[in-house]
Amino acid sequence: SNIDDWTRSDVYHNSFLIPADEALEYARKSSDEQGLPEIAVSTAQGKLLNLLARSIGAKRILEVGTLGGFSTIWLARALPEDGELVTLELQPKHAEVAQGDIAHAGLASRVKIIVGPAAESITKLQPEPPFDFAFIDADKPGNLTYFLEAKRLVRKNGVIIVDNVVRHGRVADPTQNDASSIGTRKLLEHLKTDKDVDATTISTVGEKGWDGFTYIIRL
Ligand code: SAM
């Protein structure tokens, strides 16, 4: 199998399950046009994040890594009217594009973008009221820091999702020592002994190739 088959399969399933969506198409297009990298979650993955947040009735969501706001829109749509999503982004340009995309989707009142290094912004956040759900998808060397802070900020039985933990199998390949793979291995080593959480990695294939999410619950 290869990425063409995986993409065709994603498109096929999406054609039954995920209607065409003007606001999400606008977000992808404006991100492309303004030169942002094409590293947002896939449509099927965005919908999964939305469903997971709805499954636990999330009212407060934390996101680390906004890019153009594609995953932000999926997650913010899971919130009730009085819900809130806080998203952390290093690059002012990405935050500006995201702000436009989120406003276009009619979600500006529910989303707060904090610009700056997430390792700094996240330590300043207070857990009151705690977050129900966190999605970690920024620089991968920061994964352990972001996880530890998310754990501090998320309620009991809350959910933390970490993206890109498989990286085409590179994370499990000891001959691959890129900073992103090393950052994810550090998180996995930590999770092995962390008694405050329970977790599993689900590997995925699709239009973004072979990758995966680690799904963590706060005990
Ligand atoms: N979650 C987005 C989505 O699926 O639509 C994609 C996020 S993209 C994979 C990663 C983002 O993290 C980029 O916009 C990048 O600028 C941002 N980033 C990188 N290093 C960061 C840091 N130290 N603090 C905050 N954001 C960072």
Image: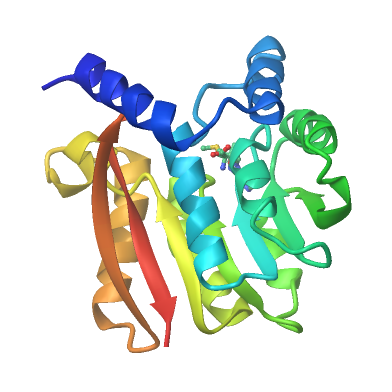
Q: Nearer the viewer, residue 24 or 21?
A: 21
Left or right, residue 117 beside residue 194: right
Q: Is residue 8 visible?
A: yes
Asked whether residue 119 is in view, the answer is no
Going by the picture, which residue comes out furthest to the top? 33
**Residue at (71% x, 18% y) in the render:** 30
Q: Picture coordinates of residue 159 (x, y %)?
A: 48, 71
Apparent side of residue 176 relative to residue 7 in the rendered image (left or right): left
* Colouring: rainbow
Q: Quadrant of the N terminus?
A: top left
The percent coordinates of residue 173 (x first, y second) are 13, 43
Using the rendered view, name the quadrant where residue 21 is placed. Answer: top right
What x and y, as percent, mark residue 13? Answer: 34, 31
Q: Quadrant location of residue 119?
A: bottom right
Question: In the picture shown, does residue 63 fall above or below 21?
Answer: below
Above or below for 60 versus 136:
below
Horizontal side of 83 relative to 9 (left or right) equals right
Dividing the image into four quarters, tell me where ligand 1 lies: top right
**Residue at the extreme front of the image, as rendered:** 16
Indicate whether 26 appears above or below 59.
Answer: above
Which quadrant is home to the C terminus? bottom left
